[in-house]
Each structure stands twice: as structure tokens, then as C-alpha cells.
Image (cartoon, rainbow, N blue to C red):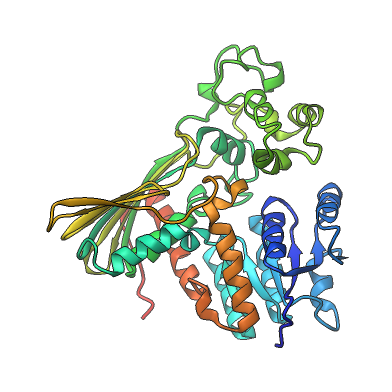
């Protein structure tokens, strides 16, 4: 297809992530020409923010796919996880390149259908594994490829979700129950399993995993706790108090964009309190509305004997990932901001500081990774050069498969062998 200099973009799902990608695309010179958003308030907020754009409002993705002429060159699919499949397949078949929020879909069968549809249609499909695109990740990858620590032997990787972020998204929020979205390892940490495959650069061979829902359970509810934080006598002393968490974000532009905009489009003291009174984000975290794990460990053996351990936990501050990499002639310790390299040959340490921006928060674009992903996708569509994308559909599906195998290993107390795709 011929793409104009000013690339046109349709947004399917104008929530936090869809709006964020639209915002970044506009900054890169793209035009937002269509939007699908069933929630009237979120649609109005989106149209107000993008009032400088000539945007056609469509009732659903089918209406976009059925138009006799495409009004966009690509589409962002940022619907809830269990609503990815149909728009992704339908819009791929209609000829739209796709920027698809992770995960591809909750199940392997559905995800394989999405990938097959994109490949058959000949369109680009970029899954939003943003961690590959950060300056930090690219610098680390270059150090490894240049032999800075010899042959890579093993990796330790930590995802510190943050206590309030976990309570927001995985206890009170959209990803609290597996039947509504998927296992936490898929909905949250498919980023990290994908990132490990990118950094290690080898096929995975075996996977094991352990984890559970340990803390956010009804039996751990304090005796005096109420069902809503606004009514709770412990609201000023509980680490997961919704009143303390969300009121504390008022006045901060970054956190008003996320997570407060998820609670309500009326990001004011009254609007936030109303949401805490009426919506799910004001509920006690110990009332049993959630069932996904709050901590998990995954062990992976890659081709050639390279090993990696991954820990994800709710019980941290929200921060960048932490990684230690061990090689035959050196090691690297990284905190998402800087990389400390230890050269064993000279027994010297030196620091590498990649370019980063902002914080680890999604509201801040994951340290610049969101910007880099959107820029790469737009450039790939404009030029037709798929190599600008750091992973293709088949590769994203392969790293998703590691996640599903890890979940099966956790549930069955077993070690899973990764099927060969050769």
C-alpha cells in the first residue's frame, strides 16, 4: 500500500494505553483520523485532547474495516485483553498495519490466529513489547554482542511492580481476575519474558515456575477493616489505602494521566472521591475480588545451557527492572538507568549510562521506551522496512509461548519442555 508522508492512524480503544500511543504518534507527525471507543466519557475526553485532529468516530472496528476506502494506514488495537482477537484479525484482513497492545491474546490458539491473519494479509504486526525499545535495553544488548563480559552464562531479572500499582491494576483493576484478562505473568510480565529472549538471543528449551496469591486474600483482612477505604478506620495506616494512594496523586500531571484517569475522567478531588465511593478502585484489597498471583518466579534454560531466573512481585516500590548478567569474563549489574560493567580480565569496573527519560511508570512512557516503540512502528510503516521493528509476529508468539508454558509448570509443579519450531 502507498503511505502518505503524514501517516494516518486509527485508535481502537481510547483508554490509557490507546490515548498514550495516539499522543506519541501525533508528536511524531502522524494524523489521528479515526477512533473507536464505546465509553462515552472516555471518547469525549479523547476528542477534546485531540481537537486539532480531524477524527471520524466509528461505532466499532467492523465499521472501520467495512469502509470502501481505508481512512488510516495503520491501527492501534488497545482494547481489553480479551477483545484483541477480532479487531486485530479483521483489521489485518482489511489491510491495516497493526500496533497491538500486549498480550496478543489470552490463549495460544487465539494468538496464533492473529499472527496468521497478519502474515496472510502481508501487514506489519508490532506487539507492544516496549522494553526492547528503550535506550537502556539497546545499550545492554550492544555490550553483550560486543563481548563485554565474554560468553553470557546466566541472568537474574527482577520486575518490581510496586505495591500500589499492583493493588491498582491486579487487585482492584482490569487484570484482577484471570477469567477477565489472563494470568498475571501474561498480562504484566510477558514484557519481561520477551525481554529476556531479546537479551539472551537464544531459543528457550525448558521452563519451570512457582508462585501464588499470598497476601491479597480475605483471611488477611484486618478485623476492623471496612469494605471501602472511604469508610475504613484504617485508611490512614494501611499501605493499600485507596484514599491515601489516589488522593496523593492529585496535582501531579503524570499520575493524573495514569492511574487517576483510569478511575474517572473527572480528575478532581470530588471526582476521585466519587470514583472511590462508587467504583472498584475504592474497595478493600482483601475482599476477594482478585485471583491472580501476587508473586512469581520463573526459571528458563536456553539453548546451549544459558539460564535465567525471573522474579515478579507486588511487594516493592514502582521502579525500573533490576538485572544482573554473568558472563565468562565479566558481569553487568543494571537498574534500568545505568549499567555497571565488571571486566574480570583487568579487574576493573566502569559505568555506562544509556539515555533514558522519565520514570518506570506507564504514565511516563516506561523511561522513553513507549516513544521509541511508536517512532519505530511509524517509521516502519512509512518506509515499508520491517527491520525497524525489533520483533515480528512469530517472535512475539514464541515468547508468549514461554509464558503459557511457565504457567502450566506453575500449576502442575513440573518442568516444561519448549517445543522446537525448527
- Image point 63% across, 78% down: which residue? 381
Relative horizontal placement of residue 322, taking residue 58 as reference (left or right): left
Locate the C terminus by quadrant.
bottom left
Residue in the foreground of this view, choosing between 115 and 10:
10
Q: Is residue 7 left or right of residue 177?
A: right
Rendered-image quadrant of the N terminus: bottom right
Furthest residue toward bottom: 1
Compared across the picture, whether 50 is left or right of 281 comes to right
Q: For residue 136, what is the image quadrant?
A: bottom left
Q: Is residue 29 above or below residue 154?
A: below
Q: Is residue 159 above or below residue 53?
A: above
Above or below 128: residue 92: below
Number of marks in picture:
0
Q: Residue at x 74, y 63 (%)?
A: 12
Quadrant housing residue 13: bottom right
**Residue at 65% across / 42% down in the picture?**
254
Q: Position of residue 111 (x, y in %)?
A: 56, 68
Which residue is at the front of the view, 398 or 273? 273
Q: In x, y percent, where is residue 319?
A: 47, 41
Question: In the rendered image, is residue 80 in sight?
Answer: yes
Measured as percent of width and height from the top left, residue 366 is found at 54, 51
**In the displayed structure, does residue 163 sit left or right of residue 91?**
left
Which residue is depicted at the point 48% across and 71% down? Answer: 390
Is there any visible trace of residue 182 in the rendered image? Answer: no
Residue 211 image point, x, y percent: 40, 42
Amino acid at each position: 500500500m502507498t503511505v502518505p508522508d503524514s501517516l494516518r492512524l486509527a485508535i481502537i480503544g481510547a483508554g490509557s494505553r490507546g490515548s498514550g500511543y495516539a499522543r506519541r504518534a501525533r508528536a511524531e507527525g502522524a494524523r489521528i483520523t479515526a477512533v473507536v471507543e464505546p465509553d462515552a466519557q472516555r471518547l469525549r475526553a479523547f476528542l477534546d485532547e485531540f481537537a486539532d485532529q480531524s477524527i471520524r468516530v466509528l461505532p466499532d472496528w467492523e465499521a472501520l474495516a467495512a469502509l470502501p476506502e481505508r481512512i488510516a494506514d495503520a491501527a492501534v488495537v488497545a482494547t481489553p485483553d480479551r477483545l484483541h482477537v477480532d479487531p486485530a484479525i479483521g483489521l489485518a484482513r482489511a489491510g491495516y498495519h497493526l500496533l497491538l497492545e500486549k498480550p496478543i491474546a489470552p490463549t495460544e490458539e487465539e494468538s496464533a490466529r492473529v499472527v496468521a491473519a497478519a502474515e496472510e494479509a502481508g501487514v506489519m504486526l508490532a506487539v507492544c513489547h516496549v522494553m526492547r525499545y528503550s535506550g537502556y535495553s539497546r545499550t545492554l544488548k550492544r555490550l553483550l554482542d560486543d563481548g563485554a563480559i565474554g560468553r553470557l552464562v546466566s541472568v537474574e531479572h527482577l520486575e518490581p511492580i510496586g505495591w500500589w500499582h499492583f493493588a491498582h491494576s491486579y487487585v482492584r483493576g482490569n487484570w484482577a481476575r484471570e477469567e477477565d484478562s489472563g494470568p498475571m505473568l501474561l498480562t504484566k510480565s510477558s514484557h519481561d519474558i520477551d525481554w529476556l529472549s531479546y537479551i539472551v538471543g537464544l531459543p528457550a528449551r525448558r521452563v519451570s515456575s512457582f508462585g501464588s496469591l499470598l497476601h491479597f486474600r480475605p483471611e488477611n483482612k484486618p478485623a476492623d477493616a471496612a469494605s471501602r477505604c472511604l469508610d475504613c478506620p484504617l485508611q490512614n495506616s494501611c499501605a493499600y489505602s485507596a484514599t491515601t494512594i489516589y488522593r496523593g496523586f492529585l496535582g501531579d500531571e503524570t499520575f493524573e494521566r495514569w492511574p487517576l484517569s483510569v478511575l474517572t475522567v473527572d480528575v478532581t478531588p470530588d471526582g476521585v472521591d466519587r470514583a472511590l465511593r462508587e467504583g472498584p478502585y475504592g474497595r478493600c484489597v482483601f475482599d476477594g475480588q482478585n485471583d491472580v498471583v501476587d508473586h512469581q518466579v520463573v526459571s528458563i534454560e536456553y539453548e546451549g545451557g544459558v539460564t535465567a531466573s525471573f522474579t515478579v512481585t507486588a511487594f516493592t516500590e514502582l521502579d525500573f527492572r533490576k538485572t544482573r548478567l554473568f558472563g565468562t569474563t565479566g558481569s553487568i549489574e543494571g537498574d534500568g538507568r545505568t549499567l555497571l560493567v565488571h571486566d574480570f580480565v583487568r579487574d576493573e569496573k566502569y559505568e555506562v549510562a544509556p539515555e533514558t527519560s522519565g520514570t518506570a511508570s506507564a504514565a511516563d512512557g516506561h523511561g522513553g521506551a513507549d516513544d521509541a516503540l511508536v517512532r519505530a512502528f511509524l517509521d516502519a510503516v512509512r518506509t515499508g522496512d520491517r527491520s525497524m521493528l525489533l520483533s515480528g509476529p512469530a517472535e512475539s508468539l514464541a515468547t508468549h509461548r514461554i509464558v503459557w508454558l511457565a504457567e502450566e509448570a506453575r500449576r502442575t509443579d513440573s518442568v516444561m519442555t519448549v517445543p522446537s519450531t525448527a
